[in-house]
Image: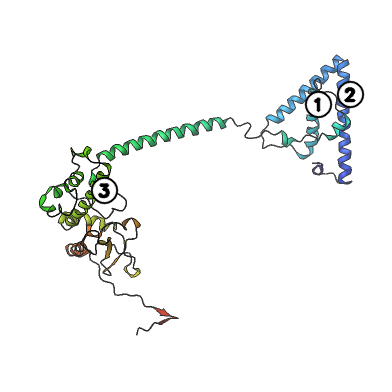
Amino acid sequence: MYSKRGVGVGSKTEMNRVSHNEDLKRIKQALDKRDRSRSSPKDNITINSATTKDQQQRLSILSAPSNTHPPAGENSSLSLSLSLSLSLSLSLSLPPPSPSLSLSLPPLSLPSLSPSPLSLSPSLPLSTDIAYACLVEESETDSEDSDVSGSDGEDTSWISWFCNLRGNEFFCEVDDDYIQDDFNLCGLSSQVPYYDYALDLILDVESSHGDMFTEEQNELIESAAEMLYGLIHVRYILTTKGQAAMLEKYKNAEFGRCPRVYCCGQPCLPVGQSDIPRHCTVKIYCPKCEDIYTPRSRFQDNLDGAYFGTTFPHLFLMTYGHLKPQKTLQTYVPKVFGFKVHKP
């Protein structure tokens, strides 16, 4: 602190000792004035007025903005006036300090008296209340949104719910009229257990025997409904309406793109390697390189390829011939140090 006062002569220790002795003399003079004020009322009034002026000066310094600082030359005089005012204001309650105690007291510094921004900020409890109110409002909004989604879920049909499940993006929604036609479902009753109950579940028909089944039987009926819908789906996508529904998905590349580099992201079509259920999972067929690949999404790993069949992609490209791309002739050529690898 003392090194910032700009004294250019003498050592640092001597300057500290001289300035400290001067402060002690001034403090002793102030204590002598205090003793005289007890015996002289007139002097007491004078000292009290001086104390009041010092307190006003201190309050004016404290009330000043925290970003304003006094010049470096006035730092020592202000700290001395503050120390005198503090010692005079506490003269009635504190005994006279001993020399050892006065030597251990460091001079006051103005930066320590500057008010902290947090201590003078009245907005902290207000911001806490506002944050709490925002949390309450968000929780109420979330509860309202969940209620709305729940009410929408009750109005959603089983077919829409099933097609929107993660991993079932390859399915299109089959019309109820197609399912209600018994001719379109010929031969499926012998392949699917709980056929009648599964069909009622797909068509959202309330069954009077719902309370008769156990939880395990209800799970079997749900699995049977998924299998029945897949077998209906493979027949539906071969019709005009079914291919039109799959066309929209193909244009949006919802079936994925070919991973081959030279196909340049060609949209693919779903295909099965067998028409027998539970034989193999679904694959994607690229019409540009005319090869099949595993879907990139891991959620299609358990999707049965029989629900799309071996016929659909080829019949689809025959129906929409303008969508069939030209077969690429470019192939990868392996090289070693720039030379083509010889094929025996």
- Amino acid type at image mark 2: Asp
244 horizontally vs 144: left or right:
left
Tell me the SS state at disc 3. helix
Question: Which sits earlier in the primary sequence, circle 3 or circle 1?
Answer: 1
Numbered label attached to residue 4: none
Residue type marked 1: Ser
The residue lying furthest to the left in this view is: 183
Please name the residue that numbered disc 2 is placed on: 32
Write the residue at 82% across / 20% down: 47
The residue identified by callout 3 is 162
Work out whether residue 167 or residue 123 is closer to the camera in this orientation and state it: 167
Q: Is residue 201 left or right of residue 120?
A: left
Q: Residue 171 location in percent, x, y?
A: 25, 54
Q: How many marks?
A: 3
Which mark is in front, 3 or 2? 3
Residue 87: mark: 1
Residue 82 picture quarter: top right
How packed mark 1 is, by other alpha carbons closer than 10 Å (few <14, some 14-19, many 20 or more), is some
Position in image of residue 227 (x %, y %):
22, 52
Residue 170 in view (yes/no): yes
Which residue corresponds to the image point at 24% horizontal and 47% vertical from the top-left?
222
Q: Secondary structure at mark 1?
A: helix
